[in-house]
Image (tube, rainbow, N blue to C red):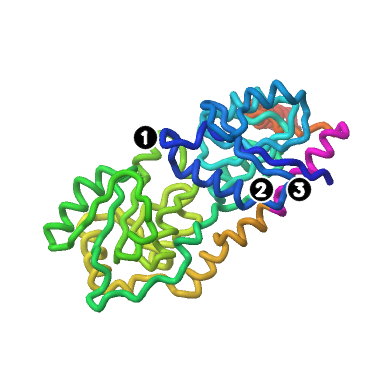
Amino acid sequence: MTERPLRFLVPGTGLRFRSGGLAVELQSARLCEGLAPRVKVVTYRVRETGRPFLDDLLQQEPPPGDALWVVSWGFDVPRLLRRLRGRPVLYHAHSSGYGFDLPPGVPVLAVSRNTLGHWGDRAPRQPLELVPNALDPAFLTPAPPEPAGGRPVQVLLQTRKSSHYLRRQLVPALRRQGVAVEEVGGWVPDLAALFRRSRVVLYDSADYWRSVGVSEGFGLPPLEALACGCVVFSSLNHALADSLDPGVVGWQIGAGTLEGDVQQIAAAVERPAAFLPDPDALGQLLARHSEAAVRERWRMALGRVNAHWDRMAAGARPLQAPGTGSLRWGRRWSRIQRRFRLGRAP
């Protein structure tokens, strides 16, 4: 099996591109150090000092080249795949629902079962892998002893991606009941420290992702908050259902009535221990998302992806799934044939 150098493609790494998706790609590149001969982060929209630029590499290296290219950036994926035609490539799939199809033979490495299921339906003949995102070690380090009066932040809300219901209905209702809610906007430099000061964390991204038209690819904040000992009330859209189990590991937000939400959250503020997940169940969940566990998933997936590209280089033809239209027409034609045979039966 050929061990190919890895090149993680990102538009840039500056403040303009700061996001969870960028953080995951940079972390993935770091975790893959030592799993490939060389691992590089390559930019394609802006040139950055000390980093290779896609245009330059494509001019210098005729296809197929010796590298395995990792593309991930949502709406840019179809254009990047066209530019990388004839080269070994891997789609690191975060959110789903962008509407594009993949060329035959392009492997998909999904960060969640939700995304895996999307591509298992849309591209059932592509090589599919599941490698979940890893928690930053900062969220898994032992927390300092809690103050005698409990954690000082009763309820924490990060306003980015939060729903109208959460900001305009639930938070005011909680405050009318005497619950203190701290709202934080923008990027938080030390989110682990903030979580460790908080009793309850609210997260509701369902409306945001429905308005955007794509899925919550993974949903790290609720998992990070759980790792820091918070009670989490969250929406359960898309990949959030990979890790959250309402009433067992986390609690649903927007669970039927505003009054029910207020009652549950206020009770969790007063008695956080009663709403925390079972330590064994949480420990197993967090272990699956440790950097060591995720690095091992990368190692196994890269071995299979490289073997796939070796077969392709030796002349194997990629499988192609039939289109939805032809499948539906086939079912319709089968029904017509059955009716015709029944009509002719004596």
Q: Quadrant of residue 85?
A: top right
Mark 2 vs mark 1: in front = 2
Residue in view at x 60 percent, y 41 percent: 92
Where is residue 323 drawn, in percent x and y? 66, 28
Name the residue beneath numbered marker 3. 304
Q: Classify mark 1: residues with Cα within 10 Å, few (<14), some (14-19) or many (20+).
A: few
Q: Quadrant of residue 289?
A: bottom right
Q: Classify mark 3: residues with Cα within 10 Å, few (<14), some (14-19) or many (20+).
A: some
Ranked by sequence position, the earlier of labels 1 and 3 is 1
Q: Nearer the viewer, residue 209 or 22?
A: 22
Q: Quadrant of residue 55?
A: top right
Task: Give SS at disc 3.
Answer: helix
Image check: 265 left or right of 131? left
Mark 1 vs mark 3: in front = 3
- Say whether marks 2 and 3 touch (CB < 8 Å): yes
Where is residue 137 drawn, in percent x and y? 50, 61
Task: Give SS at disc 2.
Answer: strand
Q: Nearer the viewer, residue 339 or 34?
A: 34
Name the residue beneath numbered marker 2. 129
Magenta region, mostly helix, strand or loop? helix
Amino acid type at image mark 3: Arg
